[in-house]
Amino acid sequence: MLSVVRVHLPSEIPIVGCEITPYVLLRLPNGVISTDDVPEAAPADGHFMRYRWYRIQSDRKVAICSIHPMEQATIQCLGCIKSKIPVAKSYHCSAKCFTDAWLHHRVLHERPSNALGENGVEEEELFGRFGSGGSGVLSTAGSGSMSNLGQNPGVNNGPVPFYPSGTDKNSVLSYNILADAYATSDSYSYCPTWALSWTYRRQNLMREIIGYHADIICLQEVQLNHFEDVFAPELDKHGYQALYKKRTTEVYTGVPQAIDGCATFFRRDKFSHVKKYEVEFNKAAQSLTDAIIPAAQRRVALSRLIKDNVALIVVLEAKFSNHGTDNPGKRQLLCVANTHVNVHQDLKDVKLWEVHTLLKGLEKIAVSADIPMLVCGDFNSVPGSSPHGLLAMGKVDQLHPDLAIDPLGILRPASKLTHQLPLVQ
């Protein structure tokens, strides 16, 4: 026999237009516990899974807990509806309330059922089906409704929100998408849990990114598994080629697939890939400490400098015609740098050093190939800061207060903090 051990929804609040994919744990006929789907097309010993999605259609007043009449109901037992139990007895104020009452509550399901509930409302009037596959998507007609899957209790947290609407178009997009590993309620306590859910954010991000129709897309904080499973295949469908560089260690999560990095995408109909460079600031930090830091102080220096940050540099060749240029036979190349300078605000010396290191590397590429540069990323810097000044002005004011924080002497002399790239904000 095939049985359901557990069903879990990724978020308690469904979002209009966003797919809801439940986590289902099954016990197979051979006793093995599995998360694999068992569709009707490939049954297990004649048994298979069938999904039905429902949403509340009733416009009644707020439901009250059947156990604690002073509390508003947040959970409804779908088994009661199936058994034609009076609707009022199906409501509970919390999961604990439902669990504590289960031994007595389940007896209701075993009693003979009537065709109608106590208010004369049939099941199909109270719950409207909106899907039968392994995932469900609420349409605009379902906004403001509760939703239920199979025999799971429904959770009523108010009207169903709409995803944000479209945005302006750009030819180049740089976007820190916030890795799922960092999107925690502790860090973003002001944000509702459904908005932090990767299931919601994934679909919303794809809508937004694709909606920009950018020729080049530079994303930061892209988890490796999300790059492989979501961004690369989805953007490939829209004509983009993908390149990726992950951060150098799993220092934050310890899970290789959850480590984040930088991803660069470009339209295949406008560009072709020529070359890729990868910058690992950890290696640059090791070389720097070996060169200027006394051996006895290198461990301390490395602990300050090593932040596992990386940069992805891609050289592209434009496919459009170059007729009318000064040299029509010359290849039209473009170098795109994508980085995330993820350094604590107190380590101003490390942040400036990483930006300077990246720019000096780009200078070498520019000189060797006479190629224009596009520098994108999340620099965690504001106008007026030393990294911003270096990027925008090509130098750092030697009296800038950020230069006062340099315990390792890596920014000395300050006159070296320059670059010759003609960057424009």
Image (tube, helix red, strand yellow):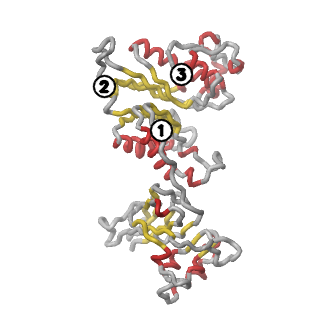
Crowding near pointer 3: few (<14 within 10 Å), some, many (20+)?
A: some
How many numbered marks, from 0 up?
3
Q: Depth check: 380 or 44 in front?
A: 380
Q: Residue 260's x, y, as percent?
A: 50, 38
- Mark 1 is on which residue type? Asp
Give the mark nearer the N terminus: 2 vs 1.
Answer: 1
| Residue 18 picture location, percent across and down | 46, 55
Secondary element at image label 1? loop
Q: Is residue 412 left or right of residue 128?
A: right
Instruction: Check if mark 3's residue and mark 1's residue have beta carbons within 8 Å.
Output: no
Q: What is the three-letter code of the residue carrying label 3?
A: Ala
The disc at residue 168 is 1
In this rendering, the label closer to the viewer, 2 or 1: 1
Residue 108 visible in the displayed image: no
Q: Residue at x 39, y 24 (%)?
A: 315
Vertical relation: 37 (above or below) 223:
below
The quarter of the image holding the N terminus is bottom left
| Rendered location of residue 133, percent (x, y) | 38, 64
Residue at 47 percent of width and 18 percent of height = 362
Q: Which residue is mark 3?
A: 284
> Which residue is label 2 attached to?
320
